[in-house]
Image (cartoon, grey):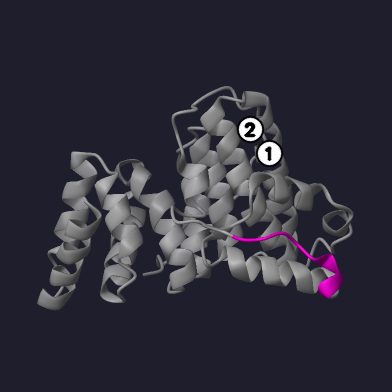
Amino acid sequence: MPDSKPRVATISKPEPLIGRLGRISLILVVGCAALAWGGLNAKRGAASDVFLDIETHLLRFETFSPATAAATLDGAAAQKLNACDAHAQRALLLLEIPLAYTALQSGAVQEFDRRSRSLEARARQALSCSPRDSFVWLVLFGLHAGRGQVDENSFDLLRMSYETSPHEAWIAVRRVTVAVPVILSAPETLRQRILAEYKYLVQKRFIEMPVRVYLNSPPAVRSLLQASVDQLGAKDKEAFAAALKKLS
């Protein structure tokens, strides 16, 4: 699916967040499903190992309570982490995204601004260490989309996420929830990539998230998604229809 001539994305400087509270792209990086998970026990091992454990749970769509997540982010262990510890930094990003969403939902603009700036700073640092981290490129795109910044520069961030990880399901199930809502504004080559990944998830039976995205989409986007599903084999279409009936 990669484009023949990949673009190199540039990351613009953070700018004030002044609204667009109706947009929820940011939290969709994490996804919809959530299970409660207990508190931390930093004595179990080195801090990096603890945060690797946190990352493992969060990638399964489990979550911490907001109080625990905030305490973890502000705790001494998090402050002492190596900025280039990819797993630990990814865990911190996954912890903070729901806090930003909570602020967005409650209309706490200043808190949303603070959390978003923290996320962007962490993502910038992570990319300086690991420039091919697809998840971090996706986080940055989600931040831009959450601000209503859906332009060529923003789409370059999404494009980089695809190019650095085109076939990893754990990223794809998150990426589809961020990319599909803006598909009508995407350049044609990127739009086709979004649709191709949507079909890929259905084919590989990671169907729940594509179906949830379909159900939350306006008619014009649903038509695009349905047309893509219609190109699949009979068993794939049956599986999609069954999941759609179950979740509707």
> In this rendering, does residue 5 appear at all?
no
The picture places residue 120, in percent across and down from the top left corner, at 67, 45
Would residue 4 appear left or right of 215 to someone viewing this image? Answer: right
User: Label 1 sits on what residue type?
Assistant: Arg
Compared with 152, 207 (above or below) is below
In the rendering, which numbered label is found on residue 115?
A: 1
Magenta residue span: 37-44
Residue at image point 84% right, 75% down = 45
Q: In which quarter of the image is the N terminus?
A: bottom left
Secondary structure found at label 1: helix
Question: Crowdedness of circle 1 by 10 Å Cα count: few (<14), some, many (20+)?
Answer: many
Secondary structure found at label 2: helix
The picture places residue 189, in percent across and down from the top left corner, at 33, 56
Question: Crowdedness of circle 2 by 10 Å Cα count: few (<14), some, many (20+)?
Answer: many
Q: Are marks 1 and 2 in contact (CB under 8 Å)?
A: yes
Instruction: Please name the residue that numbered disc 2 is placed on.
Output: 112
